[in-house]
Image: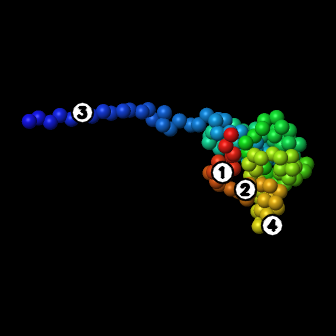
Amino acid sequence: MRSSFHWRLILVSWAATHAEPVAGERGVVLVVEDDRKLARIVVRMLERAGYRCVTGASADQALRAVDEHHPDAIVLDVMIPGPTGIEVCRHLRADGWVGGVIMISARSSPADRATATAAGADAFLGKPFPLAQLVSTVDNVVRPH
């Protein structure tokens, strides 16, 4: 008696399983940071993670960008030109904006964190922060569509 075996090999290309996400497919993130170098780094990391990014460097630019681009989340520096990031967050929450807000700041005492939370921030990261932590924090605050 003879035995026979049949193997079925299904090949999937490496590119199909390891493709980089398309920028924007995970949502839109507004990055409000007046340090251009840091803003570019943050945008690059978030775009690699699949987010489409819009930038601003002041409170006025942040508020305009929210109206124009309807972001899913905002990475918002506390110390920006014009009203502070805390005041921008308060204003957005008072207007009923429900997107995720991540405050970032070089000042990260418990009092600073509490102020951000009271203003309506969903998360707070002290500078410098690991970029991977920023991406995972954005992932956590982006609301499903």
| Amino acid of disc 3 | His
Q: Residues within 10 Å of mark 2 (few under 14, many from 20)?
A: some
Q: Residues within 10 Å of mark 4 (few under 14, many from 20)?
A: few
Q: CA distance from mark 3 to mark 1?
A: 46 Å
In this rendering, which labeled residue sits more in front, label 3 or label 2?
Answer: 3
Q: Are marks 1 and 2 in contact (CB under 8 Å)?
A: yes
| Amino acid of disc 4 | Ala
What is the x, y in percent for residue 26?
A: 64, 39
Looking at the image, tell me whether mark 4 or mark 1 is earlier in sequence order: 4
Task: State the residue position of label 2.
Answer: 123
Q: CA distance from mark 1 to mark 2?
A: 9 Å
| Amino acid of disc 1 | Asn
Q: Are marks 4 and 3 in contact (CB under 8 Å)?
A: no
- Residue 6 is labelled as 3
| Amino acid of disc 2 | Ala
> Which element is circle 2 on?
strand
Q: Is residue 96 above or below residue 120?
A: above
Q: CA distance from mark 3 to mark 2?
A: 54 Å
Task: State the residue position of label 4.
Answer: 111
Is 80 left, or right, of 18 in this rendering?
right
Q: Is residue 127 visible?
A: no
- Residue 140 is labelled as 1
Q: CA distance from mark 4 to mark 2?
A: 14 Å
Q: CA distance from mark 4 to mark 1?
A: 23 Å
> Which element is circle 1 on?
helix
Q: CA distance from mark 4 to mark 3?
A: 67 Å
Q: Quadrant of residue 27 in the image?
A: top right
- Residue nearest the viewer, comparing 50 with 40: 50
Is 24 left, or right, of 82 in this rendering?
left
Looking at the image, tell me whether mark 4 or mark 3 is earlier in sequence order: 3
In this rendering, which labeled residue sits more in front, label 4 or label 3?
Answer: 3
What is the x, y in percent for residue 81?
A: 88, 48
